Image: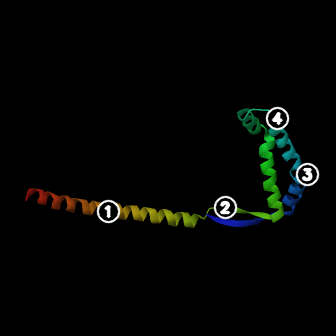
Amino acid sequence: MSKVWVPLTAEEKASVAAYLKETKDCQLLRDRVDALQLQKLDPQARTGALLRNNDFLEEGDCHLKLDRLNSSGQFETRLDPWKYLAFNAAAIAASFSIIYSLALLLPALARRYWRWLNT
């Protein structure tokens, strides 16, 4: 896997900027989550309410979008098929050599041990 920098397109920048303007740079979502946390609920009920409330998750997503806009892009993880194939080939070769070596070594050790027992 390799990480590749992917810059935001003009369309994505406009979309994220409009979303952030709508949420006042995530402040509206933060206020909703804070209001829910300030309610007089026991901790278990408060946690359940936060998890059921979509604003909690949306606030995290909003901050991710804000970071993407500030950095003008993001790193994405991409799979490299050649690296994947090379790693799997090495694992297969190592497994084969270990099993083949044991198949040759164990009978020889067993014969030597059997001779030692019989002496």
Q: CA distance from mark 4 to mark 3?
A: 23 Å
Q: Which mark is residue 24?
A: 3
Marks 3 & 1, CB-CB < 8 Å contact: no
| Residue at which label 2 appears | 77
Per the image, label 1 sits on a secondary structure element best described as: helix
Residue 28 drawn at (x, y percent):
89, 46
| Residue at which label 4 appears | 39
Give the number of the mark in front: 3 or 1.
3
Look at label 4 and name its amino acid.
Gln
Q: Which numbered disc flags the more N-terminal residue, 3 or 2? A: 3
Residue occupying image coordinates x 78% and y 64%: 73
Q: Which numbered disc flags the more N-terminal residue, 1 or 2? A: 2
Look at label 2 and name its amino acid.
Thr
Residue occupying image coordinates x 78% and y 50%: 61
Look at label 1 and name its amino acid.
Tyr
Residue 52 drawn at (x, y percent):
75, 36
Q: Which mark is residue 14?
A: none
Look at label 3 and name its amino acid.
Lys
Marks 2 & 4, CB-CB < 8 Å contact: no
Per the image, label 2 sits on a secondary structure element best described as: strand
Per the image, label 3 sits on a secondary structure element best described as: loop
Q: Nearer the viewer, residue 76 or 53?
A: 53
Residue 60 drawn at (x, y percent):
78, 50
Q: Which numbered disc flags the more N-terminal residue, 3 or 1? A: 3
Give the number of the mark in front: 1 or 4.
4
| Residue at which label 1 appears | 100
Marks 3 & 2, CB-CB < 8 Å contact: no
Near mark 3 (Cα within 10 A), the count class, few <14, some 14-19 or many ≥20, is few
Q: Nearer the viewer, residue 6 or 34?
A: 34
Give above or below for 35 relative to 75.
above
Q: How is the image coloured?
A: rainbow
Q: Give the left or right position of residue 69, taking residue 46 as reference.
A: right
